[in-house]
Amino acid sequence: MAKPTGEPAQKFNGERGVPQRTLRRANSLRYTSALSVGLAVVFVVITAGVAIVKLRNGSIEMPRLLPELVDQASFWKLFTTVPILVTAYICHHNIHPIENELQDPSQMKSIVRTSITLCLSVYLATSFFGFLLFGNHTLDDVLANFDADLGIPYSSLLNDVVRVSYCIHLMLVFPIIFFSLRLNLDGLLFPYAIPIAFDNRRFFSVTVALMGFIFLGANFVPSIWDAFQFTGATATVSVGFIFPAAVALRLTVCPIHLHSRLSEFLDVASKQLVRQEISPIVMTVISFLIPILQHAEKEIAQLTCECERHIGTQSGGMDQAISVMAQSGFVELIDFNPIRATDVQLPAGGSFVIAHSLAESQKAVTAAINYNNQVVECRLAAIVLGIKLGMKPQEAISKVKTLSDVEGLCVSFASSRGSSDPVVAVKELLSEEPYRAENIEKITEENLQSIFADSPTSSDVLKVARLYKLFQVWILKEMIRIHQHFMVTMDSEGADSNSPTFHVAEIDGGLLGPIGPLGFGIYDDLLGPPIDGASAGLPDIPIDLPAYGNI
């Protein structure tokens, strides 16, 4: 193996006639897993069939259903199955890197859920029918019970089928367990060495040593029950509970950034695992931590948004969301109530430029006449639209918060006019002239102070406002434009793609099309005087540049 490129290991793994335990990569588990589970089902079916036949013949003794508690030792024996159960379920995510084989990783949760449900069913069926069949004579390893006469026709044949199928089942499962064991032992003994897959001497030395140790254990350990109890009480408990907790307690990085790093690491590690380049133990610990931290960004974004409202501005959360959820190489499409972000992948060679407007606005100081004023106007516009589109006044007041809440009604109205543009409803149902408070109250049948009674900042707006601009066409246009141009499309870069991505839609006229100065002018009332030396016409500069567009 001249250099650690991964190619030698792949070639080695492709050889035929080589024992699976000597393979350096677990390249695919789909057939091995399916066959091993199928053989486990065969074991259950035969056990259930024999039990049912003997039950119908009346040749099964009633098993003892309750344990015999004669001393403290017999009481503690009730808990001996706990490490066995931990061992059973820790293996599902410790040794099966199934994500590597999925074209759509979003299936992972449903697949794991189905796998655990199936295995749980097999475990329960095996224990139930095994205990029903053998009763008080059930051995630690139920397979050993199939050495004797079952008391039914073809008993010897069924015994052989059970033992052979279970033997093949173990032959398929053992190499995967051995793969993980060898990788972890090598990482413990040689933490700074090159990956074991690229070191022939170390690979075969560790393999032979482990095989020898396992052979001795198989011959001298009295019962498999003892082996499972030992591993279940030590290794599997550590992997499943102690290691993740220890890592979480030692966290010194902000959970938000840590989750992002762990997510990126897990994506890469899932591919490295099958190349023998990363320990399954590490994969398991990270897999446990990801769910703990996966909602941190949303929670922090929502928290910071609510904190900003304490200074008097009715922040929607866009600035907070992008500050927390931004990722390199992606634009974020921010949605609200609740806050969430959708990754929009930039095209090759594309850039997203954030430019300073060179104008200052003291949002908290001027909120009642600027920032919060627009928030109040937008909500009033949405409420009035909702009422004119068929909602009852009280229903509109209680349910409508933003224009997006009545977008569906606007689209339905537009369709009755032969259009799909919700702006049609705004143009026909709202006046371009500013509304007075009494005009709005006549439509809503409610005092404005009552509508905003739960919002002190909105009440401050009502105290100083004389007119309300409800003709908010630009907001709907912006919302439609964003969702049209940042079109959500599945990745079409081939079947090898591991996850869906979202791309900026390219249309005639450039990346965002011939937008023009639509976005300019709408914030004029919100901005203070330009910074010293800044040109009043500065916002027009980006339009003349050879860029795709502006937003």
Image (spheres, grey):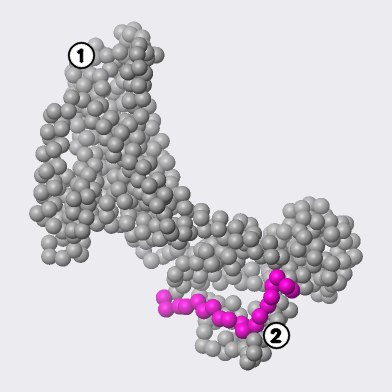
**Residue 9 in sight here:** no
Observer-side mark, 1 or 2, equals 2
Q: Which residues, given as a range, are shown in magenta?
A: 348-366
Instruction: Examine the residues drawn in magenta and state their main secondary structure.
Output: loop
Q: Position of residue 161 (x, y in %)?
A: 21, 26
Label 1 and label 2: CA atoms lie apart by 97 Å
Callout 2 amino acid: Pro
Asked if residue 259 is among those painted magenta in the image, a careful observer would answer no
* Helix, strand or loop at mark 1: loop
Q: Position of residue 366 (x, y in %)?
A: 74, 74
Any mark on residue 529, and which? 2
Q: Nearer the viewer, residue 396 or 89?
A: 89
**Horizontally, is 391 left or right of 294 in the view?**
right
Q: Give the class, few, some or many, for how many residues have Cα within 10 Å of label 2's Cα (few <14, many ≥20).
A: few
**Horizontally, is 376 left or right of 463 in the view?**
left
Q: Which residue is mark 1?
A: 149
* Location of the C terminus (image quadrant): bottom right
